[in-house]
């Protein structure tokens, strides 16, 4: 995980859709693939930092409903807000099966959104953002 040493690096990273949320989300998913993880326990974590007078807040949640897991990460400060959410299942052998991913970014520079739907029966990923949409072939084990 990238460690930020200044307010400038945090705001720059936040504007680029930075890695804090992704690292938090991937940390959860890496834990899920552990040979010892047969069931992941839901959680709700809150983080806050004040670096050089700039406040950054983040929240990371994992919920389970009807055999599916939803992991959500949010980060916000005065520049804007980024929300990422992934939906996945865990196979009987402990492998993660991604089903859906969404990202919403609202900043002073504008708004962006992205959606990815994993269509495993047709072995394709449906991708949509503001400018483009498409279908990409995928195979089991891809994330």
Image: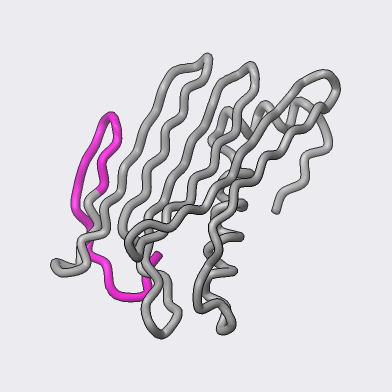
Q: Is residue 56 magenta?
A: no
Q: Does the magenta stretch include residue 136?
A: yes
Relative horizontal placement of residue 97, taking residue 50 as reference (left or right): left
Say which residue appears at 77% left-offset and 21% top-offset: 54
Vertical relation: 85 (above or below) 81: below
**Quarter occupied by the C terminus:** bottom left
Residue sitting nearer the eye, 91 or 117: 91
Relative horizontal placement of residue 105, taking residue 118 as reference (left or right): right
Say which residue appears at 55% left-offset and 33% top-offset: 16
What percent of the width, then of the height, locates residue 129?
Answer: 29, 36
What percent of the width, then of the height, locates residue 121?
Answer: 15, 69
Q: Which residue lies furthest to the left in this view?
A: 122
Say which residue appears at 55% left-offset and 63% top-offset: 41
What percent of the width, then of the height, locates residue 142?
Answer: 37, 69
Q: Residue furthest front?
A: 66
Residue sitting nearer the eye, 22 or 72: 72
Vertical relation: 85 (above or below) 90: above
What percent of the width, then of the height, locates residue 118?
Answer: 26, 59
Vertical relation: 37 (above or below) 112: below
Relative horizontal placement of residue 100, taking residue 73 as reference (left or right): left
Say which residue appears at 83% left-offset and 18% top-offset: 53
Vertical relation: 107 (above or below) 44: above
Where, by quadrant of the figure, is residue 123 drawn? Answer: bottom left
**How many marks are shown on the rendered structure?**
0
- The colour style of the image is one colour
Q: Which span of residues is magenta-colored?
A: 127-143
């Amino acid at each position: 995980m990238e460690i930020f040493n200044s307010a400038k690096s945090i705001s720059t990273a936040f504007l680029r859709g930075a890695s804090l949320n992704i690292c938090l989300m991937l940390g959860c998913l890496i834990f899920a693939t552990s040979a010892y993880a047969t069931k992941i326990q839901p959680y709700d974590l809150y983080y806050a930092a004040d670096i050089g007078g700039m406040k950054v807040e983040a929240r990371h949640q994992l919920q389970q409903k009807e055999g599916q897991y939803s992991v959500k990460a949010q980060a916000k400060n005065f520049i804007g807000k980024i929300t990422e959410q992934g939906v996945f299942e865990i196979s009987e052998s402990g492998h993660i099966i991604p089903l859906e991913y969404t990202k919403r970014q609202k900043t002073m520079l504008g708004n962006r959104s992205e959606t990815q739907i994993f269509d495993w029966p047709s072995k394709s990923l449906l991708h949509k953002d503001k400018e483009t949409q498409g279908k990409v072939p995928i195979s089991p084990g891809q994330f």
